[in-house]
Image (tube, rainbow, N blue to C red):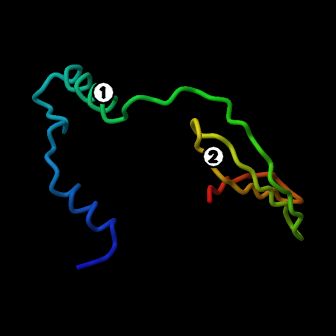
Amino acid sequence: MTLDPSHAHLELIRHAPRSLAFDPARNFETWQNELKAKFLELLGDFPDKIDPELQIEWCKPHSSFEEIRFTFLSEKNTRVPCHLLVPSTGKKPSFICPD
């Protein structure tokens, strides 16, 4: 027995029915419409769009980059903390790391 939750998820996936698997004998458009309807049902309702209310908490210079700690609202009453690392020289790729 493993304590890894991914193992349990993989087992559920492995034994799940394949009710929406594509069958070449069926009409493609019918299958596509059924798949789309189920996908949208599983996604559920999307939250209302809101102002992200970006808040910069602090900026900290390092030897080769600047670290910026900020938060934003992802949905009402849900603030997401992040760190943005900006290189001091060269191209400015970015990667946002939610805490």
Q: Badge 2: how crowded within 10 Å, few (<14), some, or many (20+)? A: some
Residue at 15% from the left image edge and 56% from the top image edge? 15
Q: Is residue 34 left or right of residue 3?
A: left
**Quadrant in the rendering for residue 40:** top left
Q: Is residue 31 above or below residue 67?
A: above
Task: Give the quadrant of the C terminus.
Answer: bottom right
Residue at 33% from the left image edge and 67% from the top image edge? 5
Q: Which residue is mark 1?
A: 36
Q: Looking at this view, name the residue that lies furthest to the bottom.
A: 1
The amino acid type of the residue labelled 1 equals Lys
Q: Is residue 56 left or right of residue 81?
A: right
Q: Badge 1: how crowded within 10 Å, few (<14), some, or many (20+)? A: few
Residue at 16% from the left image edge and 44% from the top image edge? 18
**Quadrant in the rendering for residue 21:** top left
Q: Secondary structure at mark 1?
A: helix
Asked whether 39 or 77 is in front, the reply is 77
Callout count: 2
Q: From the viewer's perspective, is the residue at label 2 or at label 1 nearer? A: 2
Q: Secondary structure at mark 2?
A: strand
| Labels 2 and 1 touching (C-beta < 8 A) | no
Q: Which residue is mark 2?
A: 79
